[in-house]
Image (cartoon, grey):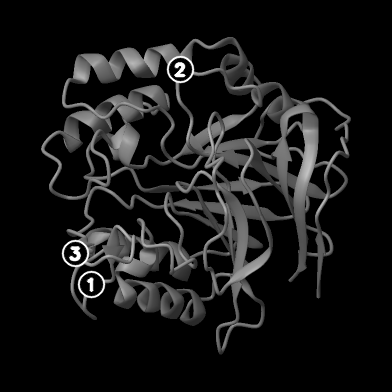
Amino acid sequence: MRIIIALFGFAFLCFGCKTAQTDLYPLQDDEFVIAFGSCNRQDEENRLWDDVVANNPAVWIWGGDNIYSDTDNMREMRKDYEEQRYQGGYKAVVKSMDVIGTWDDHDYGLNDGGAEWKMKDEAQELFLNFMDVPKNDPRRNQKGVYNSKIYNTKAGSVKVIILDTRYFRSPLTKNLGDSGKRFIPNPPGVGTMLGETQWAWLQNELNTSTADFNIIVSSIQVLSNKHGFEAWANFPSEVEKLFSMIKSSPAKRVILLSGDRHISEFSEINISGLDYPLIDFTSSGLTHTYEAYSGEENPYRVGEVINVKSFGLLKINLKNYRVKMQMIGDGNEVLNELEQGY
């Protein structure tokens, strides 16, 4: 059972303050609160940081394109990260909550880039520095920025599984026709999104998870498959592999988060053998959006597309297993909402 609400012009306030982080993370009325977003230009004002802090989430998840730095000059990329790091609004986020996340192409350093990027190892080091990853963290020695974290609370736990859809990704197939789409799907079985090592890691993360909810973060959309830009749909066999892995694992209540598109939308699919709809919550962007958006096909869309600046909010109730998913605009305006029971 779900409730879909489209709200415009309604603002809400979040009450309560952040407690010191210990072994147990704080709840708000039995809800574990996650905020996330993507597509953030470091040289443009982000008017949403105060709204993120006002909602008092336990964690902020970067969904990719955390800066825009398409360059092979690592000195320039380092400068771009530092510009973002020391912005007043963002410093308040870092001070108030846990911060984790992944990258996408523009903080990877190459637009639409994948495994071929010559500077990916150097870019990874700068990304990890920006994320304040300790020097002894396994990510400092692994290829790719994928990782996971378990958030334990007095009512249950939430596992966040962060994918890297850049480091290992095979070449895309460019569209040479006149359909207006940039890419077309690879033939079945051709190419990889995650690479063999990361796929094995993901399977283990799902198979060993005992969390009440499992949040998978992908920098690009998993479900929407008709727009012709970057998406999991460019690797159809990889989509089926992901669905099969989720379905066959004991991981409970999986939710997908994505970004990249400069629009925000909810997508969902019913998978045979899975007793809840698999939702892909896309939130994009923080400092700029696809303002000229006039519509595009997405057979899995639920509700309306939002094309104004926003971030995503998940309120995960660990008592009754309901999740309220919201798109939040400037001034804490609720732009769209979906509620799903599990």
- Picture residue at 62% right of the left edge, 36% below the top: 59
Amino acid, disc 1: Asn
Q: Which residue is mark 2?
A: 84
Amino acid, disc 3: Leu
Determine which of the numbered discs, if any, sits on residue 176 in the image: 3
Q: Position of residue 19 (x, y in %)?
A: 76, 26
161 lies left or right of 195: right
Q: Is residue 5 above or below residue 2?
A: above
Amino acid, disc 2: Gln
Q: Position of residue 97 (x, y in %)?
A: 64, 28
Q: Is residue 105 above or below residue 216?
A: above
| Sequence-wise first label, 3 or 1 | 3
SS at circle 2: helix
The alpha-carbon separation of the residues under discs 3 and 2 comes to 37 Å
Residue closest to the far front: 178
Give the mark toward the camera: 3 or 1. 3
| Sequence-wise first label, 1 or 2 | 2
Q: Position of residue 154 (x, y in %)?
A: 77, 48
The alpha-carbon separation of the residues under discs 1 and 2 comes to 36 Å
Q: Quadrant of the N terminus?
A: bottom right
- Picture residue at 26% right of the left edge, 30% below the top: 70
Q: Which residue is mark 1?
A: 186
The alpha-carbon separation of the residues under discs 3 and 1 comes to 13 Å
Alpha-carbon neighbours of circle 3 within 10 Å: few (<14), some, or many (≥20)?
few
Q: Are marks 1 and 2 in contact (CB under 8 Å)?
A: no
Q: Nearer the viewer, residue 189 or 286?
A: 286
- Picture residue at 27% right of the left edge, 40% below the top: 111
